[in-house]
Amino acid sequence: MLNWLNQLVTVALFNLRTIPERKGAAIAAAFGIAGVVAVLVGVLAIAEGFRKTMNAAGTPDVAIVLRGGADSEMTSGLTHEDVRVISDAPGIARGANAPLTSAELFVIIDLPKRSTGLSANVPLRGVETSAYEVRNKVKITDGRKFEPGKNEVIVGAGAARAFAGLDLGKSIRVGQNTWQIVGIFTADGGIAESEIWADAAVLQPAYHRGDNFQSVYVKLSSAGSFQQFKDALTSNPRLNVKVVRLDDFYSEQSTRLTDFITKIGVFIAVMMSLGALFGALNTMYSAVSARTREIATLRALGFGSGPVVLSVMTESLTLALMGGVVGALAAYFVFDGYQASTMNFQTFSQVTFAFAVTPKLLVNAIITASILGLLGGFFPAIRAARLPIASALRET
């Protein structure tokens, strides 16, 4: 066994030392794999960033109440009486004077993107003043909160960054109404940063919503009181509602888009991987052909076929890992934190988010590169081990 390991190390080191003699082909193979890794990480970073933005919106002690059967706020509707009954349910945290609930509206407005000037759907949300306590991740970073009863809005940091005209102190005209931008807010990177918030009582008549709402956000007394709250509402014969934890609600909303992006990313990576694999095969076949006499000499000196096979695969794996590391680093520095926006298929509105190149993505990318390297070296390694010693020694 020791002799076998010595043979493996000797042949592998010999192969690695000869890589500079074939640097053109080696660099081409490594960069082919680097391209696969960079594209794979870049595309999957979109899905990861979108998922991170959606998941950052909720906490276990906040719930959302929708009309029964609704899969989004756009398809939901609740009356003023529904809201009153919901606010009286057990398990809700209380503020100074009232339960911590926020009955809300969700409408879509058209605004141009800063980058392209093209029109995009932007969420305009009507909230009650208690919304800041219900979703305590929301922080005013510039300006102030809107005053109840006035045509004032506050803008999420993501929306302000992505869409034209959403600067502090400016005004936007939506339909027949003009709204003054009085504040900019953040929400720990959550989806609320893609929205514009206004007073629900002002937004209702502006969009002819009467006394109706689309959802109620509820701050629970504790995460453990969710089931008590849900059971009280779903068993109430006066209501037909759907009760979901807010983090579960947004996690479900992100699934469709993230699955779609992941499938596209994997498909592109597979197509590129085929090209990189052929490049690796060509490089290793060329390496074996160039060293036919050396390999035959080693075999004649008593080196086994096993060390020869593993040494060729070690060389291929080394090139693949070099390419994988280069591609992963390039993807991290180019894509991580890159700001973008995309359509939320559930609400048909834009969500601003940042690409997220996570350690898990990088590890998976390196594993992918390793697999390509091993596949690219396997068949050339088998060929090297099967070279007839006598005929190979006669080659010039």
Image (cartoon, helix red, strand yellow):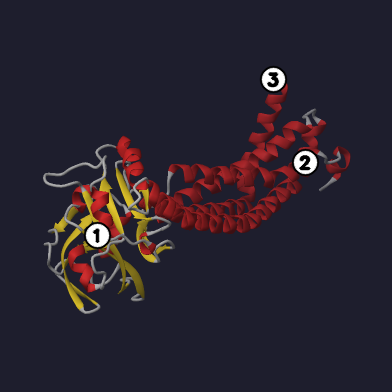
Which is closer to the viewer, label 2 or label 3?
2
62 or 234: which is nearer to us?
Answer: 234
Q: Name which residue type carries label 2.
A: Ile
Residue beneath the point at 77% across and 41% down: 382
Q: Name which residue type carries label 3.
A: Leu
Query: Pointers 2 and 3 in contact (CB under 8 A)?
Result: no
139 or 93: which is nearer to us?
Answer: 93
Please give the residue where the numbered disc 2 appears in the rendered image: 382
In space, the residues marked 2 and 1 are separated at their CA atoms by 75 Å
Q: Is residue 359 above or below residue 31?
A: above
274 or 73: which is nearer to us?
Answer: 73
Residue beneath the point at 44% across and 42% down: 359
Q: Quadrant of residue 59?
A: top left
Please give the residue where the numbered disc 3 appears in the rendered image: 2
In space, the residues marked 3 and 1 are separated at their CA atoms by 81 Å
Answer few, some or many: residues within 10 Å of disc 3's Cα (few below 14, many 20 plus, some between 14 and 19). Answer: few
Give the residue at the far bottom of this rendering. 176
Which SS class for mark 2? helix
Give the residue at the far right of this rendering. 390
Answer few, some or many: residues within 10 Å of disc 1's Cα (few below 14, many 20 plus, some between 14 and 19). Answer: few
Look at the image and tell me whether residue 129 can be seen: yes
Please give the residue where the numbered disc 1 appears in the rendered image: 80
